[in-house]
Image: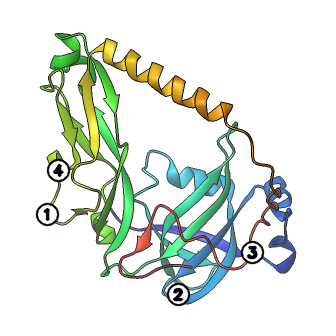
Amino acid sequence: MENIALAVEKRDDSEVKNKAARKLKYKNYIPAVMYGLKKEPVSIKIKEKEFKDLLKGRSIYSLIFDMHIDGIKKDKKETVLIKEFQRDPITREFLHVDFLRIQMEKEIETTVPIHIINEEIAMGIKEGGGVLQHGLRELHISCLPADIPEYIEYDIKDLDMGITIRVSDINISDKIKILNDPEEVVVSIIHPTQLKEEEVVAGEEAAEEIAEPEVIGKEKEEPEEEKGSPKEEGHQKEKGSREK
């Protein structure tokens, strides 16, 4: 898949301050930041409609953008991936996007979703009356940017009752390395009574936690929209380096 051209604009000082994101939203912009490759972070804004149009029908995890800032020449671009993003929990609109600079010839670490297919005809469900139980819903992988898949598919048509699929059972391209623990559970089919027993145990443990006395402490200060360098955790990072 070819890189996607993305036109963005730099934010001025007034647009980077705390609570400035709301004003940008009124102007139909999404606040964002770009960092990585030991270069200075750049605060930018994206036209909301154009960005949403670019994402239509595509997986956000595997998109590679050729970012053009303030209409600079085509040969002056930054190649980036979306490292993490924030959405409104109700409207699902983008609130902020973090872009990570990358080099196409250098491997990076990222996460991709796992798509389970043929659940409705799985042997343990259709014939055994079992219930599908999910473990991991995404995999942590390492590969070249061009080899990032939109998702990793696993067919459970022949999965029987009581069988557990682990990370080690996932077959994937030789160009991609899975970084998860091989013993981590991806999916299994269990008897309905077993699921109820697990729910009862989980409910009892939750009740015990509620019964514990609450520790009164200092309330955490609300973080500003941007303060210093971006958080390290996120969907994607360069292999062998640590972004700050």
Which residue is located at x 47 percent, y 79 percent? 242
Q: Which residue is mark 3?
A: 227
Q: Residue at x 43, y 49 (%)?
A: 58
Distance, label 1 to label 3, CA atoms, is 40 Å
Circle number at residue 168: 4
Question: Quick one: SS at disc 2?
Answer: loop
**Disc 3 versus disc 4: distance between alpha carbons?**
40 Å
| 217 up-or-down from 192: above or below | below
Q: Amino acid at mark 1?
A: Asp
Left or right of 51? Residue 190 is left
Q: Nearer the viewer, residue 15 or 48?
A: 15
10 Å neighbourhood of mark 3: few (<14), some, or many (≥20)? Answer: few
Task: Specify whether residue 70 is in view.
Answer: no
The quarter holding residue 109 reads bottom left
| CA neighbours of label 2 inside 10 A, class few (<14), some (14 to 19), many (20+) | few
Separation of residues labelled 1 and 4 (CA atoms): 14 Å
Q: Which residue is under mark 2?
A: 76
Q: Which residue does the image show at 83% across and 58% down from the upper left?
A: 218
Alpha-carbon neighbours of circle 4 within 10 Å: few (<14), some, or many (≥20)? some
* Chain-order first, disc 3 or disc 4: 4
Mark 3 or mark 4, which is nearer to you?
4
**Mark 2 or 1, nearer chain start:** 2
Give the camera-side residue of 57 and 42: 42
Residue under circle 1?
174
Above or below, 236 relative to 67: above
Image coordinates for residue 67, horizontal then vertical, percent? 54, 74
Image coordinates for residue 240, horizontal then vertical, percent: 36, 81
Label 1 vs 4, first from the N-terminus: 4
